[in-house]
């Protein structure tokens, strides 16, 4: 009898605990609503920290949903004028030194972008979190002095690049502050740590993010948003191949 | 009589004749050695590529393009039941390709991952090292080549992480251990390549008994394997290497054409000088009843004898050289042997085919005869009286 009472009370407490957690998929929707916009224009700084040196690259970026984006590097002088266009599954790079447009595909997608911890294929993800993952909340945690939900994401489809993700989501601002992305085998591949956030009108957005390829021996790549605008009007030609050589 | 006279004249020419003979001998030796080297290189490259890469022919999945790494992840097809039987009988070996990235000491290095059955015996790759004893073990044994080990600073027993995408584009990664660093002479099985178990690669790529290449033990009777596969014979596979060797051979020909030209100039000059110096002798021979044609034949024969003596010299002095490079071989300098060209990593044993030797001899002979004959046109214009007086 005592055993039964213990089991029942355990089940009851677990049920209560679960009831105290929000629905993971609802949280994903809120994250998507907060992070995504119809269009976006941002000036960003990418700091690549290698063993030998630290390189800072400034770029201006335009995006339309998750499927189209265009970036132009403003500095340093070596990279100035380099442009990158993503349109669906296609990715092109314009190199001003050779005045050539190169399509990045196949094995080249696995190479790092400007020596950073990001590979070109990291730019190729198109689906929203909601479309790609099923989420369960496994607990709560304080991360960087913010109350967060711990989310465990499992891919809904077989063609999602990362099949498992663990993330800490700010309970109020719905920003994933901490992300660990895993291979199908369970091996940790990429980590993302938001170091600073900023408020843009009615939404909160990551300002400084440290990306790290967990397999690579590096200090990671720091991504800093200098300025950002959401839902602005962007001319269609920006996302055309012609704009790469302009 | 003319032959005897020509021989005596050559001996009478002394040093001039010796120099001509030596030059011709050097040209002949060089031409035969160079061609022997290229033929030897072609033979060793073919032998090595058959042993390590292509077998007696192979099938390629139709999407595969060896010059386009973008095709790697989409060039695979399941083996047909007939082919599965051939694989089981040891008559074929399937190889699956995948694009991947390795992280030795945390350095990101793109590679081609190749899955090959561990029990195969058609290719010389030591696949027995790829056997996975414990299927649930977290570390996969792999083989790399010597050059790959050198460029990535890896050695046997080293562990690192290898990452790739499966056919759905999902990231997968495992720790791998170098079970063997193989000494493969074929760079296309070495540079930027990681070999692992075929079944394991199929499993982690979310495939089932699919391959990019099927290497055959024997030439197939019927090479048609359906629309998914394209058959390539050993000759087809060697076309690139053969073309490269031919291009190198042409480069060698240019040098020896120049040398041959110099030798011909020497013979031509000797003949001109000889005709000038021997005007009285020519006049006497005409007076004694020899026709101009016979005298032209004499002079031409003298030139041709240079070639024959050159051949004897080549036989005497070139033979040890030919034997040395034919038996011991020619080791390419270190900087050249790392050019990633098949057949260059081992010492190249020169191969002198009779056809090559005879054709080289005939070419030099023809050119020598021509160079000897050309100056004799002057004899045809000579008058016997003028020749006797020493006038031309």
Image: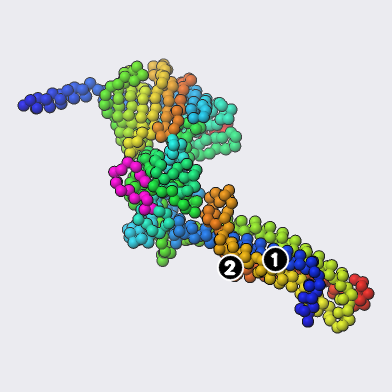
Q: Is residue B139 magenta?
A: yes
* Secondary structure under the numbered disc 2 in the rendered image: loop
Name the image quarter holding residue A110. top left
* Alpha carbon distance from label 2 to label 1: 19 Å
- Picture residue at 36% right of the left edge, 40% below the top: B174
Q: Is residue B213 above or below residue B29?
A: above
- Picture residue at 50% right of the left edge, 36% below the top: A92
Q: Is residue B2 magenta?
A: no
Residue situated in front as seen by the camera: B73 or B260: B260
- What residue sits right under mark 2 in the picture? B353
Q: Which callout, 2 or 1, points at the residue further toward the start of the chain?
A: 1
Residue A25 is situated, as x and y percent measured from the top left of the image, at 29, 27
- What residue sits right under mark 1 in the picture? B25
Q: Residues within 10 Å of mark 1 (few under 14, many from 20)?
A: many
Q: Is residue B154 above or below residue A206?
A: below
On-image quarter of the N terminus of chain B: bottom right
């Amino acid at each position: 009898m005592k055993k039964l009472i213990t089991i029942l009370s355990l089940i009851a407490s677990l049920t209560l605990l679960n009831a105290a957690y929000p629905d993971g998929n609802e949280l994903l929707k809120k994250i998507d609503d907060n992070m995504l916009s119809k269009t976006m224009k941002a000036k960003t700084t990418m700091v690549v920290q290698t063993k030998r040196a630290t390189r800072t690259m400034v770029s201006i970026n335009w995006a339309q949903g998750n499927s189209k984006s265009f970036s132009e590097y403003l500095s340093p002088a070596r990279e100035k004028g380099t442009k990158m266009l993503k349109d669906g599954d296609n990715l092109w790079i314009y190199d001003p030194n050779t005045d050539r447009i190169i399509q990045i595909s196949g094995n080249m997608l696995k190479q790092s972008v400007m020596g950073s911890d990001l590979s070109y294929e990291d730019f190729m993800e198109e689906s929203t979190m909601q479309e790609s993952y099923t989420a369960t909340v496994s607990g709560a945690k304080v991360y960087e002095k913010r109350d967060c939900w711990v989310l465990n994401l499992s891919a809904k489809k077989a063609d999602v690049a990362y099949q498992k993700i663990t993330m800490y989501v700010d309970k109020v601002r719905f920003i994933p502050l901490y992300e660990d992305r895993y291979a199908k085998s369970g091996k940790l591949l990429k980590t993302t740590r938001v170091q600073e956030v900023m408020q843009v009108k009615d939404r909160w957005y990551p300002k400084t993010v440290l990306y790290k390829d967990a397999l690579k021996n590096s200090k990671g790549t720091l991504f800093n948003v200098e300025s950002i605008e959401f839902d602005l009007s962007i001319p269609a030609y920006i996302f055309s191949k012609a704009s790469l050589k302009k | 009589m003319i032959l005897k006279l020509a021989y005596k004249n050559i001996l009478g020419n002394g040093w001039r004749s010796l120099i001509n003979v030596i030059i011709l001998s050097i040209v002949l030796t060089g031409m035969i050695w160079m061609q022997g080297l290229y033929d030897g290189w072609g033979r060793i490259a073919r032998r090595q590529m058959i042993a390590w890469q292509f077998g007696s022919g192979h099938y390629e999945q139709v999407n595969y393009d060896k010059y386009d790494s973008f095709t790697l992840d989409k060039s695979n097809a399941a083996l047909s039941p007939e082919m599965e039987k051939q694989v089981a009988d040891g008559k074929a070996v399937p190889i699956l390709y995948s694009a991947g990235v390795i992280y030795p000491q945390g350095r990101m290095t793109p590679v081609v991952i190749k899955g090959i059955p561990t029990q195969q015996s058609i290719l010389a790759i030591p696949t027995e090292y790829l056997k996975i004893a414990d299927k649930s073990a977290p570390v996969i044994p792999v083989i790399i080549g010597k050059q790959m080990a050198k460029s990535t600073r890896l050695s046997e027993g080293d562990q690192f992480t290898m990452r790739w995408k499966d056919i759905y584009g999902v990231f997968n990664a495992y720790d791998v251990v170098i079970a063997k660093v193989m000494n493969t002479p074929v760079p296309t099985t070495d540079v930027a390549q990681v070999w692992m178990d075929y079944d394991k690669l199929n499993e982690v790529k979310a495939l089932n008994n699919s391959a990019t290449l099927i290497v055959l033990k024997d030439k197939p009777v019927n090479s048609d394997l359906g629309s998914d596969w394209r058959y390539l014979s050993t000759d087809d596979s060697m076309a690139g290497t053969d073309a490269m060797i031919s291009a190198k051979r042409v480069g060698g020909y240019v040098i020896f054409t120049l040398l041959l030209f110099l030798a011909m100039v020497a013979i031509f000059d000797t003949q001109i000088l000889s005709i000038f110096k021997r005007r009285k002798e020519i006049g006497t021979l005409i007076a004694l009843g020899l026709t101009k044609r016979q005298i032209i034949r004499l002079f031409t024969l003298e030139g041709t004898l240079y070639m024959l003596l050159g051949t004897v010299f080549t036989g005497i002095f070139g033979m040890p050289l030919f034997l040395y490079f034919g038996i011991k071989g020619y080791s390419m300098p270190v900087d050249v042997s790392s050019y990633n060209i098949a057949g260059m990593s081992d010492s190249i044993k020169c191969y002198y085919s009779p056809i090559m030797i005879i054709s080289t001899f005939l070419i030099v002979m023809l050119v020598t005869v021509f160079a000897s004959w050309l100056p004799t046109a002057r004899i045809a214009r000579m008058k016997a009286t003028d020749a006797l007086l020493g006038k031309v």
